[in-house]
C-alpha cells in the first residue's frame, strides 16, 4: 500500500515546527511538502499536493495542515496506520429506535450495515475548529466533544486539516477555492456523491493536536 502524507505550507518556521514535532525531515519519502510559493491559498496548494501524491502512485492520501502535531506522542507510522485502518468498511447504524422501551417492529439485532468508507476524518485536541463568532464566545481552546463514528445519509461540516481518502475518490475530494470554507463546500458535494454511492464517512480517524488559532477578525 502506497500512502502519502500531503502537507501544505508557506511559512518556513511553521513547517520546521511540524517536522520537529513529527520527528521527520523534508526528505521523508512518506510526505509531500507542498509549498505555496505565491500565496495562492490553502485550497489550491492542497490540490497541487494531492495531484503530486497521485503522480507518485499513491493509493491513499492523507492531508494534514502544518499546524497539526502528534496527539499523545503518536508516531507518524502509527498515525498513517490508524487512518489506513479507518478507511476499511465500517458498520453504520441504519435503524433509529424512537421509543423507550423499544416499540413493536424494532429489530432486536442487525441494526447496522457494513459500508465502504469515502474518507477518514480525524478530529483535533487543544485548539478547536471554531468559526470567528464561536472563538469569540467560547475561546479557541474550549474543549469540543466529538461524535467519533461512521456517518451515512446525514450532512456534517467536513474538516480538511486531518483527512484521508483513497485515490479513487479524486476529484470529489478536491478542495474548492473559497477562503476558510474550501473544505466545507468540498465536503457537502463529496457527501452527496458518496451517500448516493452507498458510502459512509468515518469520523473516527486518529486525533491530532491543533496548535494555531485563526484570526477571528477574518472570515
Image: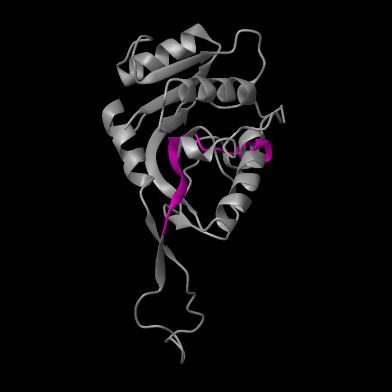
Q: Is residue 161 above or below residue 67?
A: below
- On the rendered image, what quadrant is the N terminus found in? top left
In the picture, residue 73 is in which quadrant?
top left
User: Which of the pair 90/12 is nearer the observer?
Assistant: 90
Question: Would residue 1 appear left or right of 147 to someone viewing this image?
Answer: left
Image quarter hosting the C terminus: top right
Q: Where does residue 121 sit, x and y in percent of width and height? A: 46, 42
Residue 162 on image: x %, y %: 46, 34
Point out the residue furthest to the bottom here. Answer: 104
Could you tell me which residue is drawn at 71 percent across and 27 percent down? Answer: 217
Q: Toward the viewer: 3 or 133?
A: 3
Is residue 117 a member of the stretch shown in magenta?
Answer: yes
Colour scheme of the picture? one colour
Looking at the image, residue 1 lies above or below residue 123? above
Task: Give the quadrant of residue 93.
Answer: bottom left
Residue 119 in the image: above or below residue 10: below
The residue depicted at 40 percent of the width and 69 percent of the height is 112
Q: Residue 207: image x %, image y %?
A: 38, 38
The residue that appears at 44% across and 31% down in the rendered structure is 61
Can residue 69 be seen here? The reply is no
Q: Is residue 38 visible?
A: yes
Asked whether 67 falls inside the magenta stretch, the response is no
Residue range corresponding to the magenta coloring: 115-135
Query: In the image, residue 141 lies at what x, y percent?
Result: 50, 36
Q: Is 158 situated above or below 110?
A: above
Q: How many marks?
A: 0
Amino acid at each position: 500500500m502506497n500512502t502519502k502524507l500531503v502537507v501544505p505550507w508557506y511559512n518556513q518556521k511553521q513547517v520546521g515546527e511540524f517536522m520537529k514535532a513529527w520527528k521527520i525531515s523534508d526528505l521523508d519519502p512518506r510526505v509531500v511538502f507542498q509549498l505555496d510559493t505565491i500565496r495562492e491559498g490553502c485550497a489550491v496548494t492542497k490540490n497541487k499536493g494531492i495531484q503530486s501524491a497521485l503522480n507518485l502512485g499513491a493509493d491513499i492520501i492523507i492531508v494534514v495542515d502544518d499546524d497539526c502535531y502528534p496527539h499523545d506522542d503518536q508516531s507518524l507510522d502509527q498515525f498513517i496506520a490508524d487512518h489506513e485502518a479507518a478507511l476499511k468498511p465500517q458498520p453504520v447504524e441504519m435503524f433509529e429506535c424512537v421509543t423507550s422501551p423499544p416499540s413493536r417492529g424494532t429489530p432486536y439485532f442487525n441494526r447496522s450495515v457494513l459500508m465502504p468508507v469515502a474518507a477518514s476524518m480525524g478530529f483535533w485536541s487543544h485548539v478547536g475548529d471554531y468559526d470567528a463568532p464561536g472563538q469569540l464566545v467560547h475561546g479557541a481552546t474550549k474543549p469540543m466533544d466529538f461524535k467519533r463514528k461512521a456517518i451515512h445519509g446525514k450532512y456534517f461540516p467536513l474538516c480538511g486539516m486531518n483527512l484521508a481518502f483513497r485515490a479513487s475518490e479524486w476529484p470529489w475530494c478536491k478542495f474548492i477555492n473559497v477562503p476558510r470554507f474550501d473544505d466545507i463546500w468540498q465536503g457537502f458535494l463529496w457527501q452527496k456523491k458518496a451517500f448516493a454511492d452507498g458510502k459512509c464517512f468515518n469520523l473516527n480517524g486518529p486525533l491530532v493536536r491543533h496548535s494555531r488559532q485563526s484570526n477571528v477578525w477574518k472570515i
